[in-house]
Amino acid sequence: MLFSQIAFYVLAAVAVASALGVVLNRNAVYSMLSLIVNLLSLALFFLSLGGLFIATIQVLIYAGAVMVLFLFVVTMLTPGGQAQQGEDPLRWQWGAAVGMGVILIGALAWAGFSGAISHDAKTAGVSSLSHAMQAFGGNTEAFGMALFHGYAFPFEMTGLLLVAAALGAVALGRRPDSADTADE
């Protein structure tokens, strides 16, 4: 009982301090990082109450995906953020990106030619979700089994589409620097 009370008060102090950090920080990036800490402390509150699923979703969706997206947008739209000139400091990432792209295309080609995609499509019939619900009792495990076994290919294609949309947003939102304007 004493440990849970101490943990509650520590989490409460962290939550209040990070909430104040969200409101009082003048820098938008620091404010968003404080919001991430606040969302993580909220997830720990849910975990202490026995809500493992809602704590996991809190971390994955809010503290993970949504806040990373917000940080991405804020850093992309910050004025003066693209003021660097000269050689690209992240040139090594091009090689890594090409390598990962080759691995992705190879994995998709292997999945297509080996029949794994067609097997998943046959498994993902009209009633596969209802069969999974009956087999696992209608809980989140049933949804996970149906999503990652029966609907694996559409799930992966959705992820690929979201990555392409993010890259398109970066390309469209890129400000021309002085080297780009000098060429025109």
Image: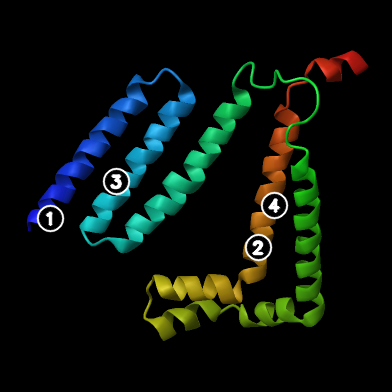
Which residue was labeled with disc 2? 156
**Of helix, strand and loop, which one carries label 3?**
helix
Residue sticking out furthest to the right:
184
**Mark 3, other Cα within 10 Å: few <14 / some 14–19 / many ≥20:** many
- Please identify the quarter of the rendering in which residue 19 is found: top left
* Distance from Cα at disc 3 to Cα at disc 1: 18 Å
Closer-to-camera residue (86/177):
86
Say if 141 sits above or below 43 in the image: below
Q: Earlier in the sequence, mark 3 or mark 1?
A: 1
Q: Mark 2 or 1, which is nearer the eye?
A: 1
Do the residues under discs 4 and 3 have CB atoms within 8 angstroms?
Answer: no
- Please identify the quarter of the rendering in which residue 111 is found: bottom right
Q: Earlier in the sequence, mark 4 or mark 3?
A: 3
* Residue drawn at point x = 77 percent, y = 20 percent: 85
Tag 2: residue type?
A: Glu
Q: Earlier in the sequence, mark 2 or mark 1?
A: 1
Image side of residue 26 versus residue 108, left or right: left
**Mark 4, other Cα within 10 Å: few <14 / some 14–19 / many ≥20:** few
**Mark 2, other Cα within 10 Å: few <14 / some 14–19 / many ≥20:** few
* Distance from Cα at disc 4 to Cα at disc 3: 31 Å
**Total tally of numbered discs in the picture:** 4
Which residue was labeled with disc 3? 42
Which residue was labeled with disc 4? 161
What x and y, as percent, mark residue 88? 78, 30
* Residue drawn at point x = 76 percent, y = 69 percent: 107
Which residue was labeled with disc 1? 3
Do the residues under discs 4 and 2 have CB atoms within 8 angstroms?
Answer: no
For the N terminus, the image quarter is bottom left
* Distance from Cα at disc 1 to Cα at disc 4: 46 Å
* Residue drawn at point x = 72 percent, y = 76 percent: 117
**Of helix, strand and loop, which one carries label 1?**
helix
The circle drawn on residue 115 is none
